[in-house]
Image (spheres, grey):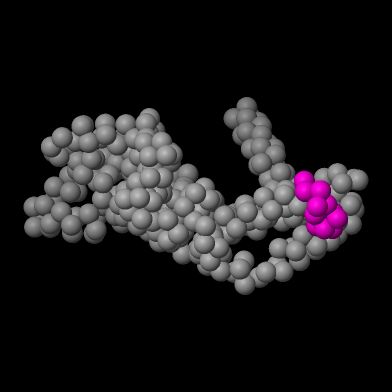
């Protein structure tokens, strides 16, 4: 009994140490963003800054209207992309989880095949710009992320196959329920853990996405927050390396601005994560272990 108690303390201590180790870089990042540029260069990174400064955030907020518009675009593509992505993934995963569906194994292999191979960047770019004409549209930030991740589909399929009792679906058939009624009234309410898990993964993916904006969007009015911050970071590097602008660039707190950019980018999703954590862990473990 004492041995079990001791083991429990050891495990808890290891978890606390691991948690602190994971949170320490975020704390260092947050504090560095509020540190004076010169103090950061001379004293290095520290948990408590030698000299507090808001210069980095003041520099980023000079064009607050653009920043707010970019935040609005990011929120829009995150909400719409996550909702549509969950709908498409569940509608594809549910038939694949049913043992009585014809060609189920072949279709599952096709979904799995997309995890191994894809069309490549050039072919993908040509399809979206020349065939679908998505360049400089809001859909260019949403559509590429909807159908490209077979991992989510296979994860949901495993959850449906292992966690939704077949007898429950057969009972609904006997009572006269249609496939759509069974899917909406029985399957979806019983799948909240995996839906929350996939929703969190999709929302993080859309929130952090800057690559689609980089290659498909050149109109500054359509820049998402990550895309805009990435371009601001590039501009800072340009000013820092430019001989002509060396004088102007020296007045810009480049290092602390980089930290502030990272804080602005991760803060909303960092705050939302604790609300999904219990569903996230349950959805991953159930879907992965029994899949």
- Residue at the top extreme, as displayed: 3
Identify the residue at image location x=34%, y=35%.
114
Identify the residue at image location x=41%, y=36%.
120
Please state which of residues 136 and 51 is positioned toward the viewer in this rendering: 136
Q: Is residue 193 left or right of residue 98?
A: right
Q: Where does the magenta region start and end?
A: 240-254
Please state which of residues 194 and 173 is positioned toward the viewer in this rendering: 194
Identify the residue at image location x=36%, y=55%.
133
The image quadrant that residue 36 belongs to is: bottom right
Query: Residue 215 colored magenta?
Result: no
For the question of whether residue 9 can be seen, the reply is no
Quarter of the image for the C terminus: give it: top left
Query: Residue 243 colored magenta?
Result: yes
Number of numbered discs present?
0
Above or below residue 212? Residue 222 is below
Q: Is residue 161 left or right of residue 119?
A: left
Quarter of the image for the N terminus: give it: top right
Image x and y of residue 100, in percent: 13, 38
Please state which of residues 234 and 29 is positioned toward the viewer in this rendering: 234
Image x and y of residue 205, in percent: 49, 49
- Residue at the bottom extreme, as displayed: 65
The image quadrant that residue 17 belongs to is: top right
For the question of whether residue 123 can be seen, the reply is yes
Please state which of residues 94 and 14 is positioned toward the viewer in this rendering: 94
Identify the residue at image location x=72%, y=49%.
238
Image x and y of residue 189, in percent: 31, 56
Q: Is residue 85 left or right of residue 178?
A: right
């Amino acid at each position: 009994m004492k041995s079990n108690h001791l083991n429990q303390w050891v495990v808890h201590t290891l978890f606390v140490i691991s948690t602190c180790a994971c949170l320490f870089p975020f704390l260092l990042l947050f504090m560095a963003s509020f540190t004076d540029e010169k103090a950061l260069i001379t004293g290095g990174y520290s948990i408590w800054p030698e000299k507090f400064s808001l210069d980095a955030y003041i520099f980023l907020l000079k064009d607050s209207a653009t920043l707010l518009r970019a935040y609005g675009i990011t929120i829009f593509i995150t909400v719409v992309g996550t909702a549509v992505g969950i709908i498409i993934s569940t509608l594809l995963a549910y038939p694949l989880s049913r043992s009585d569906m014809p060609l189920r194994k072949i279709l599952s292999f096709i979904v799995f095949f997309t995890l191994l191979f894809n069309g490549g960047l050039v072919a993908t770019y040509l399809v979206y710009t020349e065939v679908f004409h998505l360049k400089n549209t809001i859909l260019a930030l949403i559509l590429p992320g909807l159908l490209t991740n077979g991992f989510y589909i296979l994860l949901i399929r495993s959850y449906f196959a292992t966690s939704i009792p077949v007898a429950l679906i057969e009972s609904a058939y006997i009572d006269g329920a249609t496939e759509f009624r069974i899917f909406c009234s029985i399957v979806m309410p019983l799948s909240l853990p995996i839906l929350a898990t996939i929703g969190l993964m999709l929302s993080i993916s859309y929130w952090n996405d800057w690559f689609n904006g980089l290659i498909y969007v050149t109109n500054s009015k359509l820049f998402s927050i990550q895309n805009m911050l990435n371009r601001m970071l590039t501009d800072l590097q340009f000013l820092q390396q430019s001989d002509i602008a060396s004088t102007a660039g020296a007045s810009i707190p480049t290092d602390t601005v980089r930290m502030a950019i990272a804080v602005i980018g991760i803060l909303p999703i960092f705050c939302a994560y604790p609300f999904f954590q219990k569903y996230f862990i349950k959805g991953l473990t159930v879907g992965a272990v029994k899949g």
